[in-house]
């Protein structure tokens, strides 16, 4: 790209008249640029397609600015930085990929793989969020409205079938983490390292973070010694059946939809699941 | 004043204005005249270039820049992987030892889509704004953006292929980038979603480095393939709104590349390596209106021109620093 020295003309610049060739070049450049514009903007608009029918709605971290399946505010406020991912002690939060379109880089939780167990107590993801996409209006786990648990497959529920449970809730190979305060207050351990021996399976009630907090409060030892941590309502209970041998898990108004029951359910697929289109406020 | 106007014209993609002979002061005209009297032969020029090619400073700024870019991005990765919490988050928004930082363009997109002013985001945005005012605006592009680094690799490949006729360089009208900027801003405002983030290679690559790659890498590969085979540095040159956002910051930045016309041979080496060669039009014979000219805000301060200039006619300047010292 060597510049050829051109003779400098001393005459005044003539009014520019574009030759036919130049006009044609300009026209082609304009068409090319328009094509680039249409192509790139088109590609970005493809990102809106997953919104149709709210197909990309997912279980979101606590405090997500959403109303059941309507995630518009949450998706727009999220700056896609993943700070919530980084602070979660059980690594429950994942970021969505490009197939979520405008939801790319937005956090979600796959409860069956790894649910939010509130083992951080202080809602670290909410505190980490720089934009309030996880709203700072909530301070305690009981205030979260992520979804609502539902006994989706009663026929598979061990309690409904009157069966005991022995062993690791999800088998010895499952990587899920959960905090057991009796084992370690600060560090969650693998679910596989904490086997159970239960005459009637009640894992979904026994391991429910809300129920655990209520039990602590009733014992006079609320989490972190903070009475505000005490949930006002129960989330789930086991209702005995008339036969006295079996029972049905019943989801109550204190359920926040964290997904721990879905994660720990030993049935395959899980008998109890979290619905994201419902919450304790709207059923 | 003309620096601001020229910078804004560059960012809008308008053609640089050629000065008329009357606009060039007599002393400058004399220097040009002097140069014409003793024209440099091709052999002499090649000797100068060859001498510079062996200089130990030939890749000084490029090497510093690559190290900086890699270190900054690795800090994000290491902070998360080793949980040392130096820089938490990704390039779109982060926290450095507790202080919020937010990418200006991501913050703008979120604000337009969400339509709320979020205090933490505002604090992070202002911090980053001050930082890049001091450091030169589009310095972000060449010294931090991970896509810039991979695109530089793709550019080398493109040039290698183009020399053999296996790749072409389709050029677009540079105003198209400004049109993209307005369209992406309007899309965020009207749809209520951060539409641009879906295709932003900066965000995608930063998250891929920190949280692991995914399907989105296919989009990055498609962009790179387009740049390698069809259009040199197309994303950065013609599309990326992040470049304009930081370019606007650069308009008021004191850190600039400065051109000294006295020693220049006008051979155009600087323009051949530049990502945004239009900012270097002042290096064409007969274009300079003063002995020294600051290169406009569309310049990414990457230093490739500083490195390649055989006569050191281009150098980094921090405006007002000499006066202060």
Image (cartoon, coloured by chain):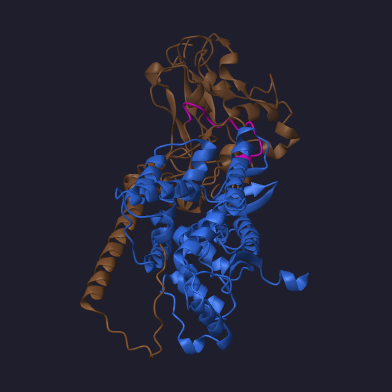
Q: Position of residue B38 (x, y in %)?
A: 51, 75
| Residue A125 is one of the magenta-drawn residues | yes
Front-lying residue, A83 or A177: A83
Of all residues shown, which one is farthest toward the right? B325
Image coords of residue B267 (percent x, y)? 47, 66
Quarter of the picture holding the N terminus of chain B: bottom right
Q: Quadrant of residue B322?
A: bottom right
**Is B321 displayed left or right of B54 in the figure?**
right
| A231 shown above or below B273 | above
Horizontal side, residue A259 vs residue B235: left or right: right
The residue drawn where x is 46% and y is 26% is A112
Secondary structure mostly seen in magenta is loop
Q: In the figure, residue B34 lies in which quadrant?
A: bottom right
From what the image shows, is residue A190 above or below residue B96? above
Q: Colour of chain A?
A: brown
Question: Seen in the image, is B316 located left or right of residue B233?
Answer: right
Q: What is the number of callouts on the image?
A: 0
In the image, residue A40 lies at what x, y percent? 34, 56
Residue at 52% across / 22% down in the picture?
A: A204
Residue closer to the observer: A48 or B291? B291
Magenta highlight on residue A256: no
Q: Nearer the viewer, residue A177 or A201?
A: A177
Q: Position of residue A108 (x, y in %)?
A: 48, 38
The quadrant of the image that shows the C terminus of chain B is: bottom right
Q: Residue at x 40, y 64 (%)?
A: B177
Q: Is residue A111 above or below residue B54?
A: above
Please indicate, yes or no, whether residue B136 appears anywhere in the rendered image.
Answer: yes
User: Residues in magenta?
Assistant: A111-126
Between residue A43 and residue A280, name the one nearer to us. Answer: A43
Q: Colour of chain B?
A: blue
């Amino acid at each position: 790209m060597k510049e050829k020295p051109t003779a400098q003309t001393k005459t005044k610049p003539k009014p520019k008249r574009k030759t036919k060739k130049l006009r044609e070049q300009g026209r082609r450049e304009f068409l090319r640029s328009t094509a680039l514009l249409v192509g790139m903007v088109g590609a970005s608009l493809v990102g809106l397609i997953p919104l149709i029918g709210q197909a990309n709605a997912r279980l979101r971290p606590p405090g997500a600015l959403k109303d059941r399946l309507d995630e518009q505010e949450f998706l727009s406020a999220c700056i896609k930085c993943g700070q919530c991912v980084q602070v979660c002690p059980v690594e429950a939060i994942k970021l969505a990929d490009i197939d979520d379109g405008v939801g790319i880089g937005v956090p979600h939780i796959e409860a069956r793989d790894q649910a939010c167990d509130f083992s951080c107590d202080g809602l670290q993801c909410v505190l980490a969020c720089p934009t309030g996409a996880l709203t700072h209006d909530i301070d305690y786990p009981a205030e979260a409205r992520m979804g609502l648990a539902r006994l989706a497959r009663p026929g598979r529920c061990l309690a409904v079938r009157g069966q005991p449970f022995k062993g690791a809730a999800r088998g010895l190979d499952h990587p899920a983490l959960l905090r057991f305060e009796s084992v370690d207050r600060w560090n969650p351990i693998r679910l596989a390292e904490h086997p159970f021996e239960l005459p009637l399976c009640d894992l979904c009630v026994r391991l429910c973070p809300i129920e655990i907090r209520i039990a602590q409060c009733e014992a006079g030892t609320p989490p972190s010694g903070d009475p505000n941590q005490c949930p006002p309502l129960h989330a789930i209970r086991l209702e005995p059946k008339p036969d006295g041998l079996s029972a049905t898990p019943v989801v109550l108004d204190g359920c926040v939809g964290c997904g721990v029951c879905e994660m720990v359910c030993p049935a395959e697929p899980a008998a109890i699941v979290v619905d994201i289109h419902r919450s304790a406020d709207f059923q | 004043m003309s620096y601001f106007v020229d910078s804004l014209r560059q960012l809008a993609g308008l053609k640089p204005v050629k000065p008329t002979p009357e606009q060039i002061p007599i002393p400058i005209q004399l220097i040009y005249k002097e140069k014409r009297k003793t024209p440099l032969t091709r052999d002499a020029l090649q000797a100068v270039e060859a001498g510079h090619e062996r200089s130990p400073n030939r890749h000084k700024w490029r090497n510093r820049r690559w190290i900086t870019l890699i270190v900054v991005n690795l800090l994000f990765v290491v902070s998360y992987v080793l949980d040392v919490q130096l820089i938490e988050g990704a390039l779109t928004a982060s926290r450095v030892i507790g202080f919020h930082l937010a990418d200006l363009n991501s913050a703008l997109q979120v604000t337009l889509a969400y339509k709320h002013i979020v205090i933490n985001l505002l604090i992070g945005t202002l911090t980053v704004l001050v930082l890049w005012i001091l450091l030169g605006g589009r310095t972000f592009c060449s010294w931090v953006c991970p896509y810039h680094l991979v695109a530089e690799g793709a550019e080398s490949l493109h040039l290698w292929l183009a020399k053999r006729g296996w790749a072409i360089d389709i050029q677009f009208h540079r105003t198209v980038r400004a049109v993209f900027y307005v369209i992406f801003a309007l899309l965020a405002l009207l749809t209520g979603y951060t539409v641009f983030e879906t295709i932003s290679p900066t965000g995608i690559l930063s998250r891929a480095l920190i949280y692991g790659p995914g399907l989105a890498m296919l989009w990055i590969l498609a962009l790179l393939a387009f740049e390698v085979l069809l259009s040199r540095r197309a994303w950065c040159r013609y599309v990326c709104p992040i470049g304009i956002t930081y370019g606007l910051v650069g308009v008021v930045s004191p850190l600039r590349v400065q051109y000294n016309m006295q020693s220049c041979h006008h051979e155009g080496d600087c323009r051949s390596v530049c990502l945004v060669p239009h900012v270097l039009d002042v290096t064409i014979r007969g274009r300079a209106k003063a002995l020294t000219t600051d290169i406009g805000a569309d310049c990414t301060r990457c230093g490739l021109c500083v490195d390649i200039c055989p006569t050191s006619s281009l150098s980094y300047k921090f405006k007002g620093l000499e006066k202060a010292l």
